[in-house]
């Protein structure tokens, strides 16, 4: 009987040459296969499905995480500027959020509501942004240690990765459950933050990895 390894072969190849003089950070794709890369500085680069690369937008300030909203605009966080820039399909930039954020990095869009969620690295918190640009607090906890990457799953859970302690967190906006066994009960008072007053649901912040 022939056996196959459960570990599939993975091909890794370089898609572009080195972008000289720039770092590379946030990355997202649109529905037609274009790739958008932020450089932690002034620029967002666009890579077409054919592999062509050019500057998509400039004039940013610490361009880091990004995401495509429900209208097809690129929402680009500016970590140094504490702001979010909206960039249309032609690369035209418009200030979207100019206050209420603290070191924004990762950006995620709730496809059902259109609300935007931003990881505030400096503020150790998650902010929720309405479609009109109104910012409100969503989650703040001692578990959040310079949150960076952020993404939704199909069930509406929010996954966040921390820069400072290399942990992944799962935020369930529906319930506040009991602590994970990974943490002693005596420590859970620090981790189990109650809901923020401006919010209606309680949130379960369950450590996802140790």
Image (spheres, grey):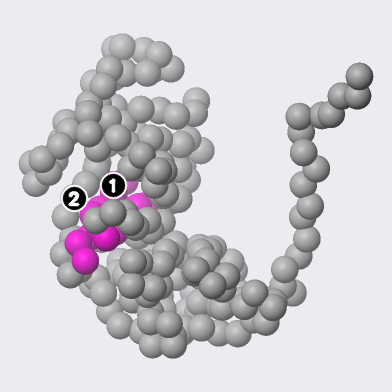
Which residue bears the numbered disc 1? 125
Q: Earlier in the sequence, mark 2 or mark 1?
A: 1
Measured from the top left, where is residue 179 in percent x and y?
A: 31, 18
Query: Front-most of 7 and 44?
Result: 7
> Quick check: can you spot residue 81?
no
Residue at 26% across / 21% down in the picture? Answer: 177
The image's mark for residue 23 is: none
Which residue bears the numbered disc 2? 137
Residue at 40% across / 35% down in the picture? Answer: 169
Residue at 38% across / 35% down in the picture? Answer: 170
Q: What is the secondary structure assignment of the residue under circle 1?
A: strand
Quarter occupied by residue 79: bottom left
Q: Name the residue furthest right.
A: 1
Measured from the top left, where is residue 201 in percent x and y?
A: 15, 37
Report the magenta residues as a range.
114-131
Residue at 76% across / 29% down in the picture? Answer: 6
Measured from the top left, where is residue 3 in percent x and y?
A: 87, 24
Measured from the top left, where is residue 192 in percent x and y?
A: 25, 26
Q: Residues within 10 Å of mark 2 (few under 14, many from 20)?
A: some
Q: Quadrant of the N terminus?
A: top right
Vertical relation: 119 (above or below) 60: above
Q: Is residue 129 magenta?
A: yes
Q: Assess whether mark 1 and mark 2 are in contact (beta carbons under 8 angstroms).
A: yes
Vertical relation: 41 (above or below) 7: below
């Amino acid at each position: 009987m022939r056996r196959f390894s459960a570990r599939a072969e993975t091909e890794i190849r370089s898609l572009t040459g080195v972008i000289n003089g720039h770092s590379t950070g946030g990355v997202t794709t649109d529905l037609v296969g274009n790739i958008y890369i932020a450089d932690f500085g002034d620029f967002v680069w666009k890579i077409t499905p054919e592999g062509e690369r050019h500057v998509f937008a400039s004039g940013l300030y610490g361009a880091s995480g990004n995401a495509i909203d429900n209208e097809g605009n690129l929402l680009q966080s500016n970590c140094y500027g504490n702001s979010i820039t909206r960039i249309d399909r032609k690369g035209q930039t418009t200030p979207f959020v100019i206050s209420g954020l603290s070191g924004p990095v990762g950006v995620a869009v709730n496809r059902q509501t259109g609300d935007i969620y931003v990881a505030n690295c400096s503020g150790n918190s998650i902010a929720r942004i309405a479609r009109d640009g109104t910012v409100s607090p969503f989650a703040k906890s001692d578990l959040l240690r310079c949150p960076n990457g952020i993404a939704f799953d199909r069930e509406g859970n929010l996954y966040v990765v921390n820069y400072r302690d290399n942990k992944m967190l799962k935020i369930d906006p529906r319930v506040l459950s009991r602590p994970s066994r990974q943490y002693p009960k005596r420590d859970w008072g620090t981790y189990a933050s109650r809901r923020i007053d401006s919010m209606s649901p309680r949130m379960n912040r369950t450590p996802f990895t140790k």
